[in-house]
Amino acid sequence: MIAGLVMGLAAKRDINIRWRGTFGSKNFNGWDMVHFEIVE
C-alpha cells in the first residue's frame, strides 16, 4: 500500500522511480521492499 502511494506521488511530480517489489528478480524473497530508486 505504501509503495503505491510513493509511486503515485512520484508520478504526479514527473519523477521516474522504480520500487524493489517490481524489479522481477527470481531471487527476490521480500527482503528489499523498502528500496526505491530514481530512474534517469
Image: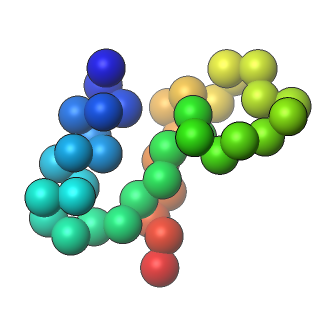
- Which residue occupies 44% across, 65% down? 38
Above or below residue 35? Residue 11 is: below
Quadrant in the rendering for residue 12: bottom left
Left or right relative to 35: residue 32: right
Which color scheme is applied? Answer: rainbow
- Vertical placement of residue 22 versus 14, above or below: above
Whether residue 14 is situated above or below residue 27 in the rendered picture: below
- Whole-percent x and y of residue 16? 36, 66
The x and y percentages for residue 11 are 22, 58
Taking the image as shown, residue 12 lies to the left or right of residue 25, namely left
Q: Quadrant of residue 20?
A: top right
Quarter in which the N terminus is drawn: top left
Q: Residue furthest bottom?
A: 40
Which residue does the image show at 47% across and 79% down from the upper left? 40
In the picture provided, is 38 more to the left or to the right than 28?
A: left
What percent of the width, then of the height, locates residue 29?
76, 20
Total residue callouts: 0
Q: Residue at x 23, y 55 (%)?
A: 10
